[in-house]
Image (tube, grey):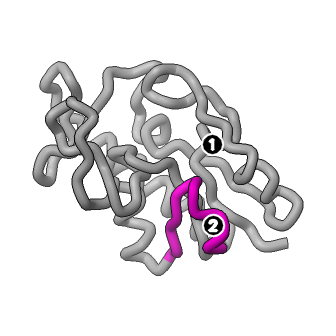
Amino acid sequence: MEKLLVSACLLGIPCRYDGKSKPVHDVISLSKKYKLIPACAEELGGLSTPRIPAEIVGERVIRYDGADVTQEYILGAQRVLDIAIENGCEKAILKSKSPSCGRGLVYDGSFTRTLKTGDGICARLLVENGIKVINEKETDKL
């Protein structure tokens, strides 16, 4: 069975910044076709759950309180890439809009829920390493 890397929050694991999850039935149901490999880049980077929201500002990841957490996001992304490689994952479904996992659109750093074109830190690293990344609304693209 092919292995598919998935943002842990999409599988119902409470690891989001707000301490909640965002389970998506269409993603969970993929377990009939794929072996789902859950991962949370933010937790793997050493950030707590819950945690202060963060957004991408230029090339940095900045929390709402102004603290720079870029290194934690980079570390978490590398650990997720390691998990993907160890498991032979060629595809990933990641949480849209996230500063870690967003693909195509992420919040713009103003903390006003405004979106801009771009990828989260983890999504970008996975794509750079040849892993196909989609978001939870694009399961038909598998």
Can you say whether 8 is above or below 92 in the image? above
Task: Determine crowd level at label 1: few under 14, some 14-19, many 20+ residues with C-alpha closer than 10 A.
Answer: many
Can you say whether 69 is above or below 130 in the image? above
Residue that appears at 52% across and 20% down: 19
- Residue 53: horizontal and vertical position, in percent? 32, 27
The picture quadrant where one finds residue 110 is top left
Can you say whether 2 is above or below 29 in the image? below
**Mark 1 element type:** helix
For badge 2, the amino acid type reads: Glu
**Mark 2 element type:** helix
Q: Is residue 13 left or right of residue 108?
A: right
Quadrant occupied by the N terminus: bottom right
Quadrant occupied by the C terminus: bottom right
Task: Looking at this view, name the residue that lies furthest to the right.
Answer: 32
Residue toward you, 110 or 16? 110
Residue bounds of the magenta highlight: 131-142
Residue beneath label 1, please?
10
How many dots with numbers? 2
Magenta span includes 30:
no
Residue beneath label 2, please?
86
